[in-house]
Image (cartoon, rainbow, N blue to C red):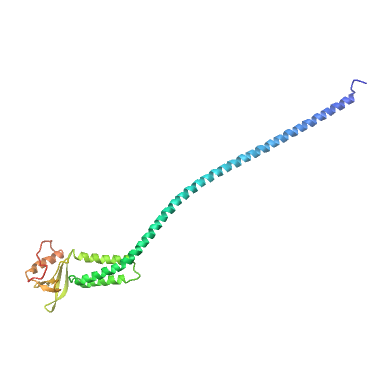
Amino acid sequence: MNKFVTLPLLLLLLFAAQAQGNTQVKATHEKIVNAISVESAAQKQYQKWSEQKEEDSDEIREMKATEAWLKFQNEKYGRYLKKQKAVIAELLRRKEEAKKIKMQLEPFLEKIVDHLEAFVKTDLPFLKEERTRRIQFLHDSLNDYHLELSEKLRRVFEALLVETEYGQNVSTSVQELEIGGTPTQVTIFRLGRTALYYQTTDGSEVGIWDKNTKSWQTLDHSYSQTLHRAQDMADRKRAVELLELPLGATK
């Protein structure tokens, strides 16, 4: 046998080896391309997951902040509700107390006005019409269904204050009295609630209210000048000074 390969066979072998080498190169290239493609896809997926992770982390942090804020608000509103419940309980307690006070106060005011009316009738006879109208006004106020209890109380206290002030001041007024059976215009001088005097316009006669007999009694004419000075002091026409006046009827 010939130990040397013929030329056509060698060429054929060379072409076959070259063809086989091209196929391997192509396969290798495809593998590399596929690997790069897979790596690229994996990188994109990783990037996507990283972005999603960051978004999820931000959302989690926001949710935790919201949870902390809601917890704070719940605790705050819990304290607020507790305080409001205490306030409501106190208001209800006061309402019950006010109801009890109202039940006791209305009849008490009725008694006060009745006592005041009786007192005015037995007191010194000054400003009779004014004081009688005030008492009637109080009765009308207490019988007014639409008037608030607080306003009724205010009016009664105001009337009591006025009556109290009568005992702490002096005053003069002009009115007509029946003296000796004859209607006579006189000047009335009130010394608090201690005494009540009258003096005729010409100063010829003076008198005092007798609490025992409930009538006017004449005084000695020597008190005329003293009473005139007292009236001037009450009207602030002269400086205050000490005067001597009787506190009961005397001749």
Locate residue 43: give its quadrant. top right
Residue placed furthest toward the right:
1
Q: Nearer the viewer, residue 100 or 1?
A: 100
Q: Position of residue 107 (x, y in %)?
A: 30, 68
Locate residue 24: give its quadrant. top right
Locate residue 173: give its quadrant. bottom left
Give the answer, above or below, for where 41 lies relative to 171. Answer: above
Q: Nearer the viewer, residue 111 or 123?
A: 111
Quadrant of the snapshot with the C terminus: bottom left
Q: Residue at x 60, y 42 (%)?
A: 52
Q: Position of residue 101 (x, y in %)?
A: 33, 64
In-image side of 120 versus 250 (left or right) = right
Q: Nearer the viewer, residue 17 or 79?
A: 79
Residue placed furthest toward the bottom:
181
Residue 134 seen in render:
no
In-image side of 243 versus 19 (left or right) = left
In-image side of 96 versus 111 (left or right) = right
Q: Residue at x 55, y 43 (%)?
A: 58
Residue 100 seen in render:
yes
Q: Residue at x 45, y 50 (%)?
A: 76
Q: Position of residue 195 (x, y in %)?
A: 14, 68
Q: Report how many numbered discs are placed on residues in the image.
A: 0
Q: Nearer the viewer, residue 186 or 137?
A: 137
Quadrant of the snapshot with the N terminus: top right
Q: Position of residue 14 (x, y in %)?
A: 84, 26
Give the answer, above or below, for where 97 lies relative to 114. Answer: above
